[in-house]
């Protein structure tokens, strides 16, 4: 494997615009990204939907809790088109600038998703910016969350904290 993911083999990476969403696919992994809020609604790995059946249908999303609960809300741009690199790599950016409203977090957020040829997972990163001209903001928590399929039934934090996950029935 090439450090950073992918082995250089496999089908071309594709980037398909579906209007409200964009799909990155390398034949192993396919993710559907909502262009407005940078959430992933579909994560297929070798044909298995890893979010299927998760809470509220399953998904991966970003959020923060300051000054009120919120998350990215922006527009999508293809920053690296796989047709420009022989299908080796694709990257999408969701740009979420601050609205200027006092009740919202005064920061600009760029969320990136990328996929390499032969990779067995996607890459996600977020860049938060707070220009000096913006008002003060306290960000108590910035998080990425995944509501995964119930097929995942084991929790492993470290060598001392491992256990069977509670089922939905257990939680109820």
Image (tube, grey):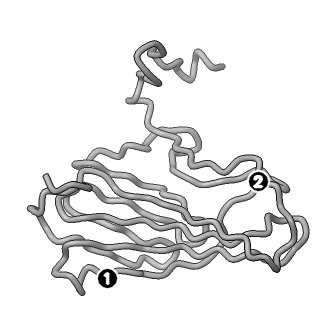
Among the 4 quarters of the image, the one containing residue 95? bottom right
Q: Which residue is mark 1?
A: 81
Residue closest to the far left: 9
56, above or below 28, in the image:
above
Q: Which residue is mark 2?
A: 139
Q: Earlier in the sequence, mark 1 or mark 2?
A: 1
**Image coordinates for residue 94, horizontal then vertical, percent:** 54, 73
Q: CA distance from mark 1 to mark 2?
A: 33 Å
Left or right for 152, reference 146: left
Q: Which residue sits at x=23%, y=70%?
A: 13
Crowd tier of the residue under label 1, counting other residues whose Cα lies within 10 Å: few below 14, some 14–19, many 20 or above: some
Q: Secondary structure at mark 2?
A: loop
Q: Nearer the viewer, residue 140 or 82?
A: 140
74, above or below 152, in the image:
below
Q: Which residue sits at x=31%, y=59%?
A: 30
**Image coordinates for residue 16, horizontal then vertical, percent:** 34, 76
Q: Quadrant of the C terminus?
A: top right
Q: Are marks 1 and 2 in contact (CB under 8 Å)?
A: no
Crowd tier of the residue under label 2, counting other residues whose Cα lies within 10 Å: few below 14, some 14–19, many 20 or above: some
Left or right for 109, reference 27: right
Q: Which residue sits at x=31%, y=64%?
A: 115
Q: Which residue sits at x=83%, y=61%?
A: 137
Q: Secondary structure at mark 1?
A: loop
**Image coordinates for residue 134, horizontal then vertical, percent:** 82, 75
């Amino acid at each position: 494997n090439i450090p950073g993911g992918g082995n250089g083999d496999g089908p071309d990476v594709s980037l398909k615009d579906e209007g409200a969403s964009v799909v990155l696919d390398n034949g192993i992994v396919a993710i559907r990204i909502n262009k407005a809020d940078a959430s992933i609604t579909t994560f297929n790995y070798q044909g298995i939907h890893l979010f299927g059946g998760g809470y509220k249908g399953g998904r991966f999303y970003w959020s923060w809790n300051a000054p009120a609960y919120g998350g990215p809300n922006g527009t999508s741009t293809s920053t690296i088109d796989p047709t420009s690199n022989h299908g080796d790599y694709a990257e999408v950016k969701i740009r979420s600038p601050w609205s200027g409203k006092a009740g919202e977090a005064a920061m600009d957020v760029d969320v990136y998703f990328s996929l390499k040829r032969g990779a067995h997972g996607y890459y996600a990163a977020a860049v938060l910016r707070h220009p000096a001209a913006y008002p003060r903001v306290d960000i108590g928590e910035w998080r990425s969350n995944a509501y995964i399929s119930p097929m995942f039934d084991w929790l492993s934090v470290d060598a001392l904290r491992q256990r069977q996950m509670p089922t939905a029935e257990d939680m109820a």
